[in-house]
Image (cartoon, grey):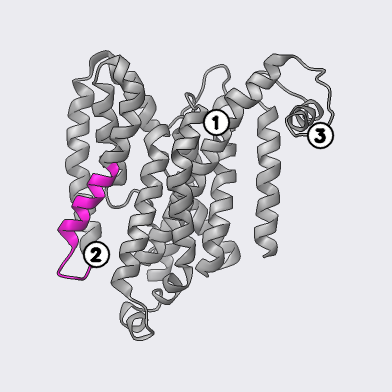
Amino acid sequence: VYAIAGLVSLLGVVVVVTLAIGSTHIPLATLGNILLARLPFTGVEPTWASSMETIIFDIRLPRLLLAGLVGASLAVAGATYQGLFRNPLADPYLIGVAQGAALGAVTGFLLPVSWQAASIPLLAFAGALLAVAVVYSIAKVGKTLPMTTLILAGVALGAFLAAITSYLMIASGDKLHGIISWLLGTFSLTSWWQVTMVIPYISLGIVVIWLHARPLNVMQLDEEQAQQLGINVERVKLILLGAATLITAAAVCFCGIIGFVGIIIPHAVRLIWGPDHRFLLPLSTLAGASFLILADTTARTLLAPTEIPVGVITAFLGAPFFLYLLRQKKRAIF
């Protein structure tokens, strides 16, 4: 409980501080007054330029909120997959979500320019869900869903979809730059309508996963033991896979494929606070949101006015951590 309260406080501090940081620096005192002025009955008189309000409420705040939602969803999805597969190296893109979303987005980029704004996120979302649906239908054996078969099917279909995506990128001509920027992950074009579009999907998926924390704990022992203890294992697996896929697809459809968040955040939380999913899942939600907000702030300010794709920042931080996990796993085996 104290850890959750601490991460909630940290997230609040991160939100306030990152709102003030950017090419136009806004003092924290001024930022506080601007935020208070939007509340009823505060009586704060504007003493700042109207452009500051535009920067905060129309540019930085929606971008910050979307980054937080995406970070939370990827971290929760990663923790869910790691619990289901009982493997700390599993990530939200393990069973074809990334490859399906990439193919859908690239297809959207090849459409007429006037269609792209709506078609790219829609096709990315549909591509991610369809890819996982195909993987699930291939892996399912009767009424059971073997996890090993699911992973193998995801790898095979992912390679197939990646090959098609690569060919379309080669044939895209002058649209290649936009495609690569999307694939590396960016929040540069975030607006309020994108935030309102993803909130229902991500909120619903995260709540469903949180509610299944206890069955997920029991399933860490063994599927047969979980079945004997009254857990409908196949039903829980289907619900958790569906919810994790939904929030991952919603996360990537607007901002692209951001790697390593779903690996490093759940594992870092597990190392500090333990493997109990009743706490691991909410703590991963808060830590993932804070981490990606900070990563995006770094991406837009480090080389300003040039913006670094946020996927580059998360990979720069995540790759060494991933190698560390592999080394620890190797020691555990030998």
Provide the secondary structure element on which disc 3 rests.
loop
Q: Earlier in the sequence, mark 1 or mark 2?
A: 1
Quadrant of image for the N terminus:
bottom right
User: How would you rate the neighbour count of disc 2 (Cα within 10 Å): few for under 14, some for 14-19, many for 20 or more?
Assistant: few
Q: Which quadrant does the C terminus fall into?
A: bottom left
Instruction: From the top left corner, tell me how far across and down residue 135 is, in percent.
Output: 20, 53
Mark toward the start of the polypeptide (3 vs 2): 3
Q: Which residues, given as a range, are shown in magenta?
A: 128-148
The structure residue drawn at horizontal position 69% and vertical position 57%, both measured from the top left corner, is 5
Label 1, label 2: how far apart the Cα atoms are = 38 Å
Q: CA distance from mark 3 to mark 2?
A: 59 Å
Which amino acid lies under the numbered mark 2 shown in the image of this protein? Thr
Magenta span contains residue 144: yes
The x, y position of residue 50, in whole percent, is: 71, 15
Tag 2 residue:
148
Q: Which residue is mark 1?
A: 63
* Residue at position x 54%, y 29% in the image: 299
Q: Which residue is mark 3?
A: 41
SS under mark 2: helix
- In the picture as drawn, the residue positioned furthest to the front comes out as 41
Residue 143 lies, with reference to residue 166, above or below; the image says below
Q: Nearer the viewer, mark 3 or mark 2?
A: 3
Whether 186 is drawn above or below 174: the answer is below
Q: Is residue 70 magenta?
A: no
Q: Amino acid at mark 3?
A: Phe
Q: Residue furthest bottom?
A: 228
C-alpha separation, residue under disc 1 versus residue under disc 3: 28 Å
Residue at the image point whose x is 38% and y is 51% from the top: 92
| Residue 4 drawn at (x, y percent) | 65, 59
- Left or right of 41, for residue 25: left
